[in-house]
Amino acid sequence: MRIEIVNTGTELLIGDVINTNAAWLGQRLVELGLNVERCTTVPDGIAIELALREACMRADVVIVTGGLGPTSDDVSREAAAAVFGLPLDLDDGVLRDLEEFFAKRGKIVNEHNRRQAMVPRGGVVLPNPNGTAPGLFLPAELGKKNNLSCAVFLLPGPPRELKPMMVGHVEPCLRELKMAAASSRRLGDGRLEAAATLEVWECRYFKFTGLGESDISMALQGDLEKIAGLEIGFCIGKGDVDVRLSGSGAAMAQAAKLCFAKLGEFLVSDDRRLIEQVVVDMLQERGQWVATAESCTGGFIAHRITNVPGASNVLAHGFVTYGNGAKTQHLLVPAGLIAEHGAVSAPVVAAMAEGCLRVSGADHAMAVSGIAGPGGGSEAKPVGTVFIALASKGHEVVVRRRWFRGEREWFKTLTSQSALDFLRRRLCGYEIPE
Amino acid sequence: MRIEIVNTGTELLIGDVINTNAAWLGQRLVELGLNVERCTTVPDGIAIELALREACMRADVVIVTGGLGPTSDDVSREAAAAVFGLPLDLDDGVLRDLEEFFAKRGKIVNEHNRRQAMVPRGGVVLPNPNGTAPGLFLPAELGKKNNLSCAVFLLPGPPRELKPMMVGHVEPCLRELKMAAASSRRLGDGRLEAAATLEVWECRYFKFTGLGESDISMALQGDLEKIAGLEIGFCIGKGDVDVRLSGSGAAMAQAAKLCFAKLGEFLVSDDRRLIEQVVVDMLQERGQWVATAESCTGGFIAHRITNVPGASNVLAHGFVTYGNGAKTQHLLVPAGLIAEHGAVSAPVVAAMAEGCLRVSGADHAMAVSGIAGPGGGSEAKPVGTVFIALASKGHEVVVRRRWFRGEREWFKTLTSQSALDFLRRRLCGYEIPE
């Protein structure tokens, strides 16, 4: 099954927005055992129609992203209707949804929004609970009149609208199309190609943290490559690395065993959960609480933890003690300790963690203080220097010095990742590396 | 001058690597006053030749990234030679550079690496001090034999090799091509089109918040479209909308006036600054401080503020009071008030803001409490309900109810955006909408 993606949006071509949709869709399709053969990005407007027409001539399925908004340069609906040779009808159901969406916000549907209720005749509406632009599915049969035999999905551009629609509506449909394609081939030439495509094909992501990509590939790749039929991919995340493995059930079992045996201590999850999710899940299982005392990360650790549904069962208190006075006032850090060692120092960060544990009554408290930059560095403590402490009931407080180079947000990401990993290690019973 | 980009690499299509090169190249080209008309991503191997041939038929300049490595699926050199109908010669200069590069690392040039010294006859080698793959420039004249009139640049895929080559070699060359194109048009038809392309071309982003994309387009688009030569684009951000305007200096001045006059109150910035940056800048100018008291956003507001360099001059205290006890203990919210109204209520959030102002000694305090979901909603207060309060010295505390649907992180994004906008409005002297 030949698949192409057409991404629309001038913002992608002039570099205002990085095209993350293409990569995300590629990942999802790989997991279905499908490969994207081409991805074309075109600006808003007339270029969409041409690119879509070309893609439909080459592919069996085309996924279009973007161009479903209310403004005049959003023309994906019109382009698809033109390529398929279909009229556009006002869809009452979509219009009602739009009216409801706006009514809840005390607004009425204006002329521009009304365009979003137009549907190429025969197209299937894909509901969008996260925005005003519904998606559309045009089955291949609809294009017969124009000598096309290609199914088209139109998805909204914003990732938070696109992703649930892809998972909830497009993927089930693609699975069916794949089965149909395989069985029609089987009937056609009797070579049972279908058996290969329909075999149980697993795809798993082993997420590691605390090691670089090359460390992980040095440790694993040689042995993984010896497993017959296993496909291996590495993908660097934000402070973690995914090893994507796919293959038959037997190959996967062997590969999983290897990952656990060789690097189990660095393994965050084998089911795509981020470290904050893993930590919240473990705390919840044990009925334990964590509190945060953040200087340089400015609330980012608490933010990551509270991104996980159910976080309110494990976190009640968090402090952003950006100023020295705040460290003394809320975390009971002695002012003299700060004066003696500086706010970015092992004793102060240890005291922050211990104070946070005491004040919050939690079971674990994380504290960080460092120099996020661009200013504030010195020779002894250059920009990127950070101290991370973990205090847990019944344990000695642990404090470690790290050095994370990069821009402010990257520094905050790596620091928060490390702090969360300290807690993961404590909960798993692993040492916290020097 | 029509420009296309061809990105090569299976890793881009299966989503192991996000295509940041396309966005970066787009930004650089916009700064030269050039627009990318299409960007095509193809896997390694044979697909490159087809995509390059198509692009060369449409464009004046094609930039190819990747496919210059030593392995057998790196075939950009061969594809370009085939499209132009040129033989490949071993280039002694490139071979010498390669030998030197490997000698420094105690290695010799093997058969695979030798391929990197092959150059389509007549092509110009672009040196690569950061890797083994030199870039190549094929001037448009070379393609005459095959009826092409398109210049092609081949650049290495890794950003740290591509970027310096683009800046150092490709951009100077593009500037010359642009000048030549403009002057040949001028000579050819005497209509001085060149004047337009070489005229000062401005591009500005008007960032709005508190209005939807369609509200903004309803208010502005009609009048903006009347301004001759103005290009308009809309781009939805995370809680804000960018209106991208480009055109001559005169058109831009007229457009800017219009944006200010019609929607000045909703205008965050006209220089791409995010709202957190705008707020930090305004506070810093006035020597004022802000503190945060966050329940449902879990530290995200403080995180956004502290993403701005220099935030330590305006924020010293932040609280993540996720539990009711934390609200009472740190923000002095009377326990009875929470018992009576619930933690997600106007009186409690107002008390959080006032307590935060008092405890922190700041000039402004923001407080939020809401139901991020997926659980915790009720009929009276469904998931997505949030109260946002702003307390400022010398002002009555303001508290507003909002309803933001979507996943947890989206809810946090919109809530934090609103809270920051309350402060922006206060600092600018605008009312805070009901």
Image (cartoon, coloured by chain):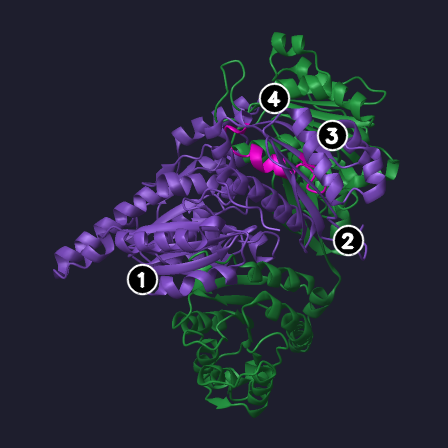
Chain colours: A purple, B green
**Disc 3 from disc 2: Cα separation:** 23 Å
Q: Mark 4 and mark 2 in contact (Cβ < 8 Å)?
A: no
User: Disc 4 marks which amino acid?
Assistant: Gly
Say whether residue A289 is magenta.
no
**Residue placed under numbered mark 2 in the picture:** A381
**Residue placed under numbered mark 3 in the picture:** A331
Q: Is residue B373 left or right of residue A52?
A: right
State which tag comes first along the sequence, 2 or 1. 1
Q: Are marks 3 and 2 on the same chain?
A: yes
Mark 1: give few (<14), some (14-19) or many (20+) Cα within 10 Å: some
Report x, y in % for residue A114: 49, 34
Which residues, given as a range, are shown in magenta?
A293-311
Q: Is residue A17 above or below residue A126?
A: below
State which tag comes first along the sequence, 3 or 2. 3
**Residue placed under numbered mark 1 in the picture:** A227
Say whether residue A294 is magenta.
yes
Q: Quadrant of residue A362?
A: top right
User: What residue is at 83 percent from the left and 34 percent from the top?
Assistant: A335
User: Disc 3 marks which amino acid?
Assistant: Leu
User: What residue is at 51 percent from the left and 44 percent from the top?
Assistant: A430
Report x, y in % for residue B287: 87, 36
**Residue under mark 2: which chain is it in?**
A
**Residue placed under numbered mark 4 in the picture:** B323
